[in-house]
Amino acid sequence: MRALTYQGPSKVRVENKPDPRIEHPQDVILKVTRAAICGSDLHLLHGLVPDTRVGCTFGHEFTGVVEDMGREVKSLRQGDRVVVPFNISCGSCFYCQRHLTALCENSNPASDVASGVYGYSHTTGGFEGGQAEYVRVPYADVGPMKIPDDMDEEEVLFLSDIFPTGYQGAEMGEIKAGETVVVFGAGPVGLFAMKSAWLMGAGRVIAVDHIPYRLAFAEQYAKVETVNFKEVGDVVMHLREMCGGRGADVCIDAVGMEADGSKMHTVLGLVMKAEAGAPTAINWCIDTVRKGGNVSIIGVYGPPWNLVSIGTAMNKGLTLRMNQCNVRRYMPHLLEHIRSGRVDAKGIITHRFSLEDAPQAYHLFAQKRDNCVKCVLAPHG
Ligand code: NAD
Ligand code: ZN
Ligand code: ZN
């Protein structure tokens, strides 16, 4: 089969790989119908995730049709159309029983920190990803959710990650009716955090980014106020003034490890090496939120980014919450928001590509060119 693979920092290519096989009686093999590229894939592309091996297939946001199944799979049949959470979870361990599927202890036994994720390096278990013609899905009775007959793949694709992630980001902020929420990062994850903040009763939502087309998209798609941090001088002071001097009630970091590459060493436009610096977006959250406020971190950070303003956070009496999203628990509920028309999840797709053109999609998305918000691949056309 054809698959999008890692070839070292800033390099991906589509190559032939063996078709995946059933390795365990609870596996299914999916024929991938749609696979999206995520801001998290850019961390891999930039070489920021330890133990990302050359030749591994990326992709953790996908839908597919069940092609083959192990003998113990009970809830799926050949031909079923499914959307799959990016976390791989066993369904029965201490954490899975508590719906904390991002913390499953069985999906990546080699680590007591990172659980299994599709296409996300050997740090998260070395599972092959879904930016390919076929993918193996372990614990098939646990993660995949059937796609309703009256809905198409693209309508539900983002239930695999970014809609639940944005929603959980808003939920961790414990937004109360009428509160002011500032979302740093107007990428796909930030957009769903903004939409979710409204669903939770926010009175005001402000998006912060530095890319004009993304701020314009957020204004129109999520009906938010916007701030371009490159245009306002001291962005923290600017935001606090916008919030009556006291600060925002809730701040959400939907940026993570310098997703814009601003702290990367670049040569001829290619990212060569990442430099671990203080994480800008988290510290802006801590400084912008009012005393006693909530900071919710959904942008992804790795160990080199352990330089947070914890002293300020302590003295301001803040609540900081963060995690990889426990995707599965949110899927049925968020499906209803999509079905009812309250959230047009598909509406953030700006680019569609064949699998063969996936490297082009990566570079467009990484460089934030051509008004790119979200790229989706169609491996079988
Ligand atoms: P993206 O790269 O498309 O968007 C990030 C945006 O942040 C860009 O528009 C960029 O211009 C902006 N930005 C950069 N620095 C900023 C700053 N200091 N302040 C404000 N904005 C800034 O990525 P995405 O797909 O939206 O993903 C965002 C983050 O969410 C990534 O770190 C990704 O890994 C993470 N993520 C987390 C989870 C989870 O489970 N917690 C799931 C999916 C994605
Ligand atoms: Zn993702
Ligand atoms: Zn588990």
Image (spheres, rainbow, N blue to C red):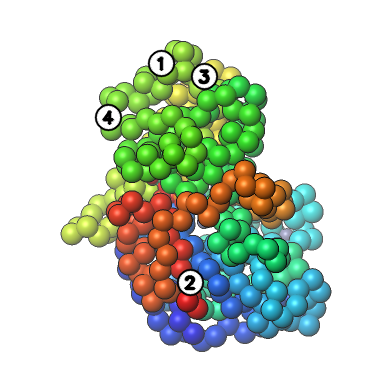
Which is more N-terminal, label 2 or label 1?
1
| Residue 105 spot, x, y in % from top left | 69, 59
In the displayed structure, 132 sits above or below 316; it is: below
Residue depicted at x 44% and y 39%: 220
The number of callouts visible is 4
Residue depicted at x 32% and y 67%: 360
Judge: label 1 CB < 8 Å from ligand 1: no
Does the rendering let one see residue 229? yes
Query: Which secondary structure lies at badge 4?
Result: loop
Query: Which secondary structure lies at badge 1?
Result: helix
Q: Label 1: how many residues lie within 10 Å, few (<14), some (14-19) or many (20+)?
A: some
Mark 4 belongs to which amino acid?
A: Glu
Query: Which secondary structure lies at badge 3?
Result: strand
Q: Label 3: how many residues lie within 10 Å, few (<14), some (14-19) or many (20+)?
A: many
Q: Which residue is mark 1?
A: 241
Mark 2 or mark 3, whichever is nearer to me: 2
Mark 2 belongs to which amino acid?
A: Ala
Q: Which residue is mark 2?
A: 378
Mark 3 or mark 1, whichever is nearer to me: 1
Which is more N-terminal, label 3 or label 2?
3
Query: Which secondary structure lies at badge 2?
Result: strand
| Residue 363 spot, x, y in % from top left | 32, 61
Which is more N-terminal, label 4 or label 2?
4
Which is more N-terminal, label 3 or label 4?
4
Q: Are marks 2 and 3 in contact (CB under 8 Å)?
A: no
Q: Which residue is mark 3?
A: 290
The one of 129 and 369 positioned closer to us in this rendering? 369
Disc 2 to disc 4, how far (Cα)?
Answer: 38 Å
Disc 3 to disc 1, how far (Cα)?
Answer: 11 Å
| Residue 362 spot, x, y in % from top left | 36, 63
